[in-house]
Image (cartoon, rainbow, N blue to C red):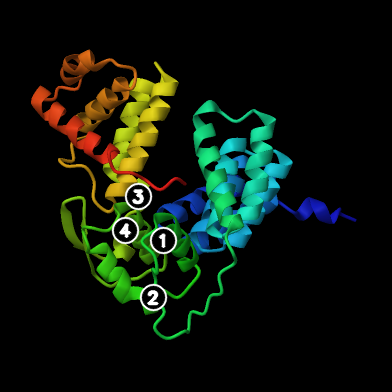
Amino acid sequence: MKNEKSNVVPFPRLKERLLERGLESISQKEYKEAAALLRQARTLDREDADVGTALMIALYQSGDYEGAKEQGRQMLHEGIGNYFEVMDLFLMILVQLGEHEETVRTISALLEEKEAPLEKLDHYEKLLAFSEKRVQLPKPELDPDQKGQKLFESDDLQEQILRVSRLVHENIRPYIGEIRGFIRNPDEHPFIQTLLINVLKEQGISDTFEIQKLNRHDTVNPAELLPIFETQLYNLLITRLSRDVEQKNPTLYAHIKTMVDRHFFLLYPFEPEPLDTGLWTAAYYSMGLKIYGQDECNEKIAMYYSVNPEELADAVRYLESLEEISLPNL
């Protein structure tokens, strides 16, 4: 009698094919389909870091925050994948869920181990301080159906951030009018404007909205916007900075990338103009060197990137203006 197991023929490279299809679905923003594919791949190999991380991202993007959190917790517990990449995703999900007590416990334990990369310490410490403040606040009594309820009752940035973080889990339709007025008001803080635009995008709001921020103006459909850090200019800029700076000076690159991320977040859905990768690579490189008091390198940088020195000087001044915008102490 034949052994029944001998009749089971694994499909060639099934896990790899599921992973490829899952990643393709993520790139096409079909997150639920991606999660289903990646779950199948994970049943074939629980220890595959690429599958686990992609599944975590797909679950998060599809709105299954609890599933993403559990996936992250399992990967951290079992030591699967790049520890700090998984940790960063895990912390982002905890904050999204408003689970600040667990955020505090997790970061406190992480800092006690004293193994976190130096370039991440500042981020972890700020996130810890933010969550500690949230833990100390009294629990709000939410009544979404209350007539006349306003989205923002305070001009305090920290309170506005907390309110937007809760808004992610609510039906935002009752607040569309207030959001519309907020993001078209050039006097409102661009950081909060970006948070609101992201919420509109995540909830698939396909209305058109007028946006005015940082002397820029446009009308957009949030559902059609690319994510902040997936635009062509951003990816080309980071790729080129990584090539030109990271190999020579990883610490300088980390400072520059943090600055780039901060600026692109503030500007979103706009980007620096003109859309010239060489110009902005040169400008951010120059800004980074200023941290180390090396202003005299500007002419060499302009020559290396084949940009006009005067245009480079204008670009650097623009970045300096963005740096002057005070950000919430997250």
Q: Is residue 129 above or below residue 116?
A: below
- What amino acid is at disc 4? Gln
Query: Residue at coordinates 30% horizontally, 16% vertically from top-left?
Result: 293
Front-most of residues 303 and 139: 139
Secondary structure state at the residue bearing disc 4:
helix
Q: Nearer the viewer, mark 4 or mark 3?
A: 4
Q: Nearer the viewer, mark 1 or mark 3?
A: 1
Question: Residue tagged by mark 3?
Answer: 228
Question: Residue tagged by mark 1?
Answer: 160
Front-most of residues 63 and 134: 134
Q: Earlier in the sequence, mark 1 or mark 3?
A: 1
Residue 163: x, y in percent?
Answer: 45, 64
Q: CA distance from mark 2 to mark 1?
A: 12 Å
**Mark 4 neighbour density, 10 Å: few (under 14) some (14–19) many (20 or more):** many
Query: Residue at coordinates 37% horizontally, 63% vertically from top-left?
Result: 201
- What amino acid is at disc 3? Ile
Question: Residue tagged by mark 4?
Answer: 193
Question: Residue tagged by mark 2?
Answer: 150
The reply to whether residue 217 is in sight is yes
Secondary structure state at the residue bearing disc 3:
helix
